[in-house]
Image (cartoon, rainbow, N blue to C red):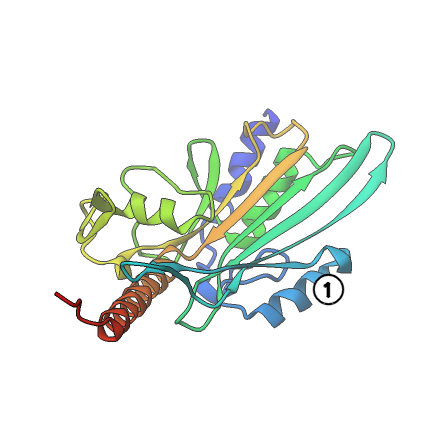
Amino acid sequence: MNKLTRVILGFLGFTLMTPLLADEFDIVGLKLGMTVEEVEETLLAHGVIPESVQQKHQYFQYFDGAELHDTESFLHSVTAGKEVRGEKGRDQDSFVVVFNSPPEEQRVVAITRTIKTLNNPTTIGQYMSALNEKYGEPQTINGRLVWWIEEGKQNCYAANNLVLSPNIDQIMGSIFLSGGKRYFLDRFQNTKLTSVDDCAGYLVYDMGMLQPDAPATRVTATMIDAPTWVKANLKSMEWVDKLQQEATEARLGSSTKPTL
């Protein structure tokens, strides 16, 4: 029996595991829905370089018909990492943790971890077995291992398309049909969907070709709570539209009639 067959049989041995609940999925302790304080504590406990923990902020802009305005800045993401030098170069472990935008309370909606191992890397087969033991049996989509969060919900996207970049604009455009800059919120790329609430979040591991004997020199883990992020983004759009309307009304109300 070759090693590939043994790995596949190993997966089958876990098919009777109870599916994980949404709040049981984590990447080295990082979970969807965490606060920024919880994220930074978890990263430091994992051993990232304290100086590498950085917060990145963004802001929205809106136009009152004459001037461009900025909202107050808000937290977009936390980045961090660590590295170990070896004979063959630096082994790196880096993170990007993304939060939804206001006015909703800011919580984690996406986590990306990238591991680069040049010195004595684990094999892909060992990685696959460890993942299966932790998360249960995955689906394989386009050479990537996928777990759905929550069980029983649908892929937000059409066919086997997955958005792996933690980018809300890309997610919105992949879920909803659109025209110009407008999304049609009742029309979905996946025609089986009737509501964003039917969408599943997902955890994806990408290790390149799934050859069990090959070294896992680069592994990317991505976990995204697509439905929560989309609903928070829609609230953000409503909030900015309201700010724009109020600013426009204030500008018009303060203008004087021309002398004719």
Q: As drawn, which residue projects farthest toward the right?
A: 87
Q: Return the x and y of residue 103 as percentages of the image width and height.
A: 39, 71
Q: Return the x and y of residue 146 as percentages of the image width and height.
A: 45, 44
At mark 1, the secondary structure is helix
Q: Return the x and y of residue 48 as percentages of the image width and height.
A: 74, 56
From the viewer's perspective, tell me whether residue 31 is left or right of residue 28. Answer: left
From the viewer's perspective, tell me whether residue 29 is left or right of residue 152. Answer: right
Residue type at mark 1: give it. Answer: Ala
Question: Foreground: 197 or 150?
Answer: 197
Question: Foreground: 91 or 237?
Answer: 237
Q: Quadrant of residue 83?
A: top right
Q: Quadrant of residue 54?
A: bottom right
Q: 152 above or below 3? A: below
From the viewer's perspective, tell me whether residue 240 is left or right of residue 125. Answer: left
From the viewer's perspective, tell me whether residue 89 is left or right of residue 124. Answer: right
Q: Residue at x 27, y 73 (%)?
A: 250
Q: Residue at x 55, y 70 (%)?
A: 35
Question: Foreground: 125 or 110?
Answer: 110
Q: 62 above or below 112? A: below
Counting labels gives 1
Q: Return the x and y of residue 124 as percentages of the image width and height.
A: 62, 34
Label 1: how many Cα within 10 Å (few below 14, some 14–19, many 20+): few
Q: Residue at x 70, y 46 (%)?
A: 93
Q: Residue at x 62, y 62 (%)?
A: 29
- Name the quadrant of the N terminus: top right
Q: Is residue 201 visible?
A: yes
Mark 1, residue position: 45
